[in-house]
Image (spheres, coloured by chain):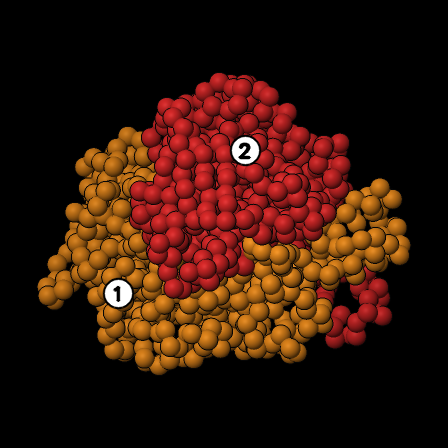
Chain colours: A red, B orange
Amino acid sequence: MSMTRRAFLERLSAVGGTTLMLMGLEAFGMGIASAQTAPPPLQGGGAGKKVIILGAGVAGLTSAYELGKAGYDVTVIEARAFAGGRSQTARKGFQLTELGGETQTCNFDEGQYINHGPWRIPFHHRSTLHYIKEFGVEVELFNNDNDNSFMYFTKGSGPLANKPIRKREVAADMRGHTADIFAKLAQNGALDKQMDAADREQFLAYLSAEGYLKGDAHDYHGAEGRGWITKPGAGLVAGEEAPIYKLGDVLHSEAWKVLSSITDWDQQRTMFQPKGGMYMLPMGFVTKGGVGEKIVYSTVVEKIRQNAKGVEISVVNGEGKRSTVKGDYCICTIPLSVLKSIDTGFSAPFKAAMDGCAYAPVGKIGLQMKRRFWEEDHWIYGGHVYTDNSEIGSISLPSTNWLGKKGTLLGYYQFMGDAAKVSALSPADRAKFAVDFGQKVFPAYAESFETAFSVAWHRVQYNLGGWGMWSDEARARDYPVLLQPQGRVYLAGEHLSHIGGWQAGGIESAWMQIDALHKRASAAA
Amino acid sequence: MSMTRRAFLERLSAVGGTTLMLMGLEAFGMGIASAQTAPPPLQGGGAGKKVIILGAGVAGLTSAYELGKAGYDVTVIEARAFAGGRSQTARKGFQLTELGGETQTCNFDEGQYINHGPWRIPFHHRSTLHYIKEFGVEVELFNNDNDNSFMYFTKGSGPLANKPIRKREVAADMRGHTADIFAKLAQNGALDKQMDAADREQFLAYLSAEGYLKGDAHDYHGAEGRGWITKPGAGLVAGEEAPIYKLGDVLHSEAWKVLSSITDWDQQRTMFQPKGGMYMLPMGFVTKGGVGEKIVYSTVVEKIRQNAKGVEISVVNGEGKRSTVKGDYCICTIPLSVLKSIDTGFSAPFKAAMDGCAYAPVGKIGLQMKRRFWEEDHWIYGGHVYTDNSEIGSISLPSTNWLGKKGTLLGYYQFMGDAAKVSALSPADRAKFAVDFGQKVFPAYAESFETAFSVAWHRVQYNLGGWGMWSDEARARDYPVLLQPQGRVYLAGEHLSHIGGWQAGGIESAWMQIDALHKRASAAA
């Protein structure tokens, strides 16, 4: 998820008419925090039982690692030649061929990368951090809220529309002017009914602190944190604060839409990313966790069959050779968008429930820049440039290789109808589209651009979408059905959690299902 | 500076009666941002001229590095056995003996450290970042604003006083309730004079976004980012938001004092620290910058003399041997608190101007904890625990070695009268004082504590204070005098800038003075 759910919804309203709007604004049943902090204790061991795991994304890797530790004989079937599922990192040589598209080979310099799948780990995703710690994956802070970054709003009016303005300016002025007006209302008796005199005095002190109000009149004249025309340094000049914007100008710019009392739960300020790219997390499972030797790569599931004694998975490998894999149980982490086209033999009600989950079109593009102009020219270190141009969504600046020579930024991150539209462009045209917009925000954007790598997850084979989405109705009707095993097959993945679109959802879904599987296997033994 | 200047002043008001209050609340002439982004070009070269630099802190190191590059013959006289001035990092074996105090030998584990001097670099300190980049010092983000951290306010009343509460809860509830009240006033016509109908509608939309107000009534009922009782995960439970606090309870707690529309300029969210400790910055000058070979260590300045042809510095080395060092010019970065006791031969007006700068008592303590309970138990990764107990000031959690086993936190950071008071304790009693308070905030504090290292900068020889402070009167009257050379001696350091208490002040002051020195030397040549 690139932005708060609220911002996402606001953006949809702003755009209007996308398919998603038809589902209703409260249609996202995506949960937003992570409940589990540790894997379930699988007591008693699984010796003698074989579990076939479909998919080597984080849900499959988690299942294989934990069941393997408990003594189960596990085999992971993975369609791709590498593990990680969507937890990918595009680096030099990384290849992607979208359905119906040309093959992109990532041409970034050594050390440059883009996490075109999941890219950040909020502090409360205990499950993801559990494995980060377990495998000693080195993490660094991801700057998710940079007051010095720009915002670029295009649908408003007035002098602050269609130009880059700093988030700190908008925050200081919107809240400062508001506190100023409110303080005057309070002084004129508007709160006399709500509060006693002592509370009103404290409340005025709060408004003064919040809005940097000055004097007995409680006037807003700006705040040093808002910014400077002449910055203090050595010498005689003490510095000069930049003049404030008028309330009406900020209001009409619509840039206040990114402000909130507090960031949304899934958009906390304190986030992490693995050093070197998100693929370091699956690599932890594969190497340190020893799961690698249990993965059969480049092998696609064609058919799932089962009876009272076990499951049988028909697969085809990269050379077109067909075979079957047999086991006692199966954990299937294949996205529902893909699974629904596989011959599963599942019951009609179960298949109907699978149809209740829609998959989000999602697009991202990484742009390698020969110079970190956002740092050098604009003093912006990480964070996001938010815009109401929903085909761009946001430009995100890298939180790694600080002060380095080159940098790779995220040029767009769009969803739903916007992602569908942009994904129709060729990779070269997507890059041109992204660079043309970025040039409006940063004067050195186009001249610094070197090479791009883009993804449209809804066009990626074996994914067919960024993540699963549940309407409120489907969440109530279909989601509980899919949490139950279909015979000996257990579904797992971010789509089967309230943390949709995040790795923590996949991990915690796996934890729940291996716990259920283990209890059943132990009882049967 | 540990906190915003405002918070600092508020704290002083809260405490009352400190020496500083006598100077008046607006007495701090400390500037807060950094004007220069690159060193001055010293064109023409300084061949044949010798400059003696007193002090190997960042101002002295900067002077030596830049003048050396321009061809000057430079010698740096340093009283200590190591370079860096206050830019120190206490690691295993680091020793400190305060005046009149026992010798502390830092007993932290390998890899553990505390920056007991400067510890963070705001994104706008271009001068500091210039040398970070020049010497390839690896930096990482410093988490300066963690919404998930606790606040612990003791002077308020009601159910939220004297207990740890999360910043996100206070921010959401204070701003949410405020937006709720204001929205209702606006709906009842309170803004009819100030705004037209269209603006009022946009303003209500802003209040709704700011306060997460719900429905046509614009009621505040909480926000998901505020926190959860039951967090969403896998399974059927979608999660349950934590109940909100009453406005009166938050108001009476006084914890709202840490909220502001925007962080102060010197307390920006986006900050850096060198990996491994702040001493990596002076080490960059010493090793990569080649300044090390120009430093004469363990050598104390006793007397400064000059005539029309040059300067002569009388020094005594560690073995008590006296000698003189001669040069054409001198850059003196010795803190004024120390310099005023040296026989400088400066003019009476110049000496009087030196007396205009007061030095801040400042105390810090590092506490090594055998377990990162703030991360493991409370999910707090970096940031500060603010308190209105001014003898503690803040507890700060380390922004390094994420998810590691042990960690070293800052147990207090106090100023002025509070620092003077705590500094009278023995190192062991300071640690006990800090641990006793921390135990109120974190249940595992005392049982996790292993070893401490504390500093009281006003008791440190060769510093005698944390940083220079200027009253408005002294800034106008005395500061300009000290910017002028005293004969062939130029003063430099953070005290001679508007960025007092920050490394950037020292660097930019040095830039200004070497530029002046070079212009004069070039004209004379």
**Apparent side of residue B84 relative to residue A340 in the rendered image (left or right):** left
Amino acid bearing label 2: Ile
Location of residue B116 in the rendering, given as x and y in whole percent from the top left corner: 35, 63
Numbered tag placed on residue A342 in the rendering? 2
Q: Residue at x 55, y 33 (%)?
A: A343
Label 1 secondary element: loop
Nearest the eye: B335 or A345:
A345
**Apparent side of residue B79 relative to residue A46 in the rendered image (left or right):** left
Q: Residue at x 63, y 52 (%)?
A: A480
Location of residue A234 in the rendering, given as x and y in whole percent from the top left corner: 43, 48
Nearest the eye: B448 or B496:
B448
Asked whether residue B11 is in view, the answer is: no
State which quadrant residue B438 falls in: bottom left
Circle 1 is placed at which residue position? B109
How many numbered marks does the figure carry? 2
In three-dimensional space, the C-alpha distance between marks 1 and 2, rounded to whole angstroms, equals 56 Å
Q: Residue at x 40, y 28 (%)?
A: A322
Label 2 secondary element: loop
Location of residue B280 in the rendering, given as x and y in whole percent from the top left corner: 29, 51
State which quadrant residue A265 falls in: bottom right
- For residue A26, above or below residue A386: below
Location of the C terminus of chain A by quadrant is: bottom left
Q: Chain of mark 1?
A: B
Count neighbours of disc 1 (C-alpha within 10 A) and say few if under 14, some if 14 to 19, many if 20 or more. some
Q: Residue at x 61, y 65 (%)?
A: B229
**Apparent side of residue A14 relative to residue B322 in the rendered image (left or right):** right
- For residue B146, above or below residue A440: below
